[in-house]
Image (cartoon, rainbow, N blue to C red):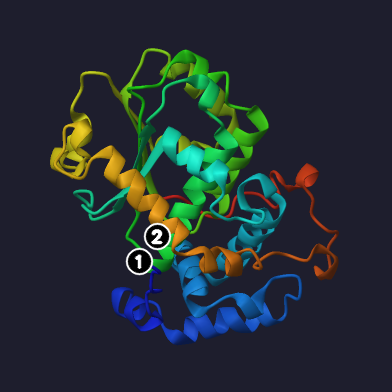
Amino acid sequence: MALKQISIQREYEKNPEISPEDIAQLREWLVTQPHLPGELLTDLDLLLVYHCCERSMQVSKQVLDLHYTLRTMFTQFFHNRSVDKKIEFTLDTVLICPLPTRSTDGNKVIYARLLDNDPRNFFFPDIARAFMMIFDLLQYEEGTWPGLVLIIDMDQSVLAHLGRLELMVLKKVLYFVQECMLVKLKQICFINAPPFVDKLMMLIRPLINKTLMDIIKIHPVGTDTMFKTVPRAAFPKESGGEYKSYNKIKEEQLDRLKSNQDFFQQENKRRVSEPLRPGARPNNVDNIFGIQGSFKKLDID
């Protein structure tokens, strides 16, 4: 079924430290930026930016600009999004599951794992694209959270999957998450981590800053330390929890995406027009990494 966007009034109730005047001020600045899709951005969009930037007006401006700049440039993940055969194949390969139960600190939790462990079916750009579609729809419906915990279950991962990670694609994903994803990222947890997880970390470490590195948590196979953050019962049934089955979750996620194609048709229009960018040379993929330093600070528990 088509989802209903959370109301801006509900967001003001959830975040009493944010006022309509704050959002109006950000809107006033947006009017002066002809390269940005300001007329297509709702007050909820602006509030999501302002919230994740800890109510800093200057940082919010920088992150908002970079967020939509990267959505324009990173075409593998964001161009002309729709529920096509690639997305359907991806959701048969990887489970991406927002859990209804919050973490012990009240943060939103997304659980991800392989459903098909054949490395030949592992296409990381398509997985990143599917994840962002599910995430965008979830945020459209639920709005802000105190923070986000991302759990990646590696129990079906094999070393050959690392060979399927294209370095530039990985760099783009991590840069987007680190610099301008509109959420307060609290933890990235690798659970059931095999011995070769150290090789994954060797790939990741040069691509991220210390702040992001510090929120990555490794939970080796056979440990139950993850359950101190997220209760065991919150996980899907096949993972030892009491939530729905993998297949039921997969079917529901695909149905959610298919039922909200209009959302993605409209979101596809929210892109940057570089020739209209005032007072600066147009950005491109070659010069975007490292642009103007690091803006958004991640929260560390």
Query: Is 231 situated above or below 48?
Result: above
The picture places residue 204, in percent across and down from the top left corner, at: 53, 28
Residue 260 in sight here: yes
Q: CA distance from mark 2 to mark 1?
A: 6 Å
Residue 33 is left or right of residue 120, and the answer is right
Q: Quadrant of the N terminus?
A: bottom left
Residue 300 is left or right of residue 30, and the answer is left
Other-residue count near label 2 (Cα within 10 Å), few / some / many at <14 / 14–19 / ≥20: some
Query: Is 81 situated above or below 7?
Result: above
Q: Which three-letter amino acid code belongs to the residue tagged 2?
A: Leu
Residue 183 in sight here: no
Mark 2 vs 1: CB contact within 8 A? yes
Residue 76 is left or right of residue 182, and the answer is right
Measuring 72% from the left and 80% from the top, which residue is drawn there? 32
Q: Which three-letter amino acid code belongs to the residue tagged 1?
A: Glu
The picture places residue 289, in percent across and down from the top left corner, at: 70, 44
Other-residue count near label 1 (Cα within 10 Å), few / some / many at <14 / 14–19 / ≥20: some
Asked which quadrant contains residue 172, the reply is: top right
**Residue denoted by label 1:** 142
**Residue denoted by label 2:** 138
Q: Nearer the viewer, residue 277 or 119?
A: 119
Q: Which mark is on residue 241?
A: none
Measuring 37% from the left and 65% from the top, which residue is drawn there? 144
Measuring 18% from the left and 37% from the top, which residue is drawn there? 237
Tag 1, which secondary structure? helix
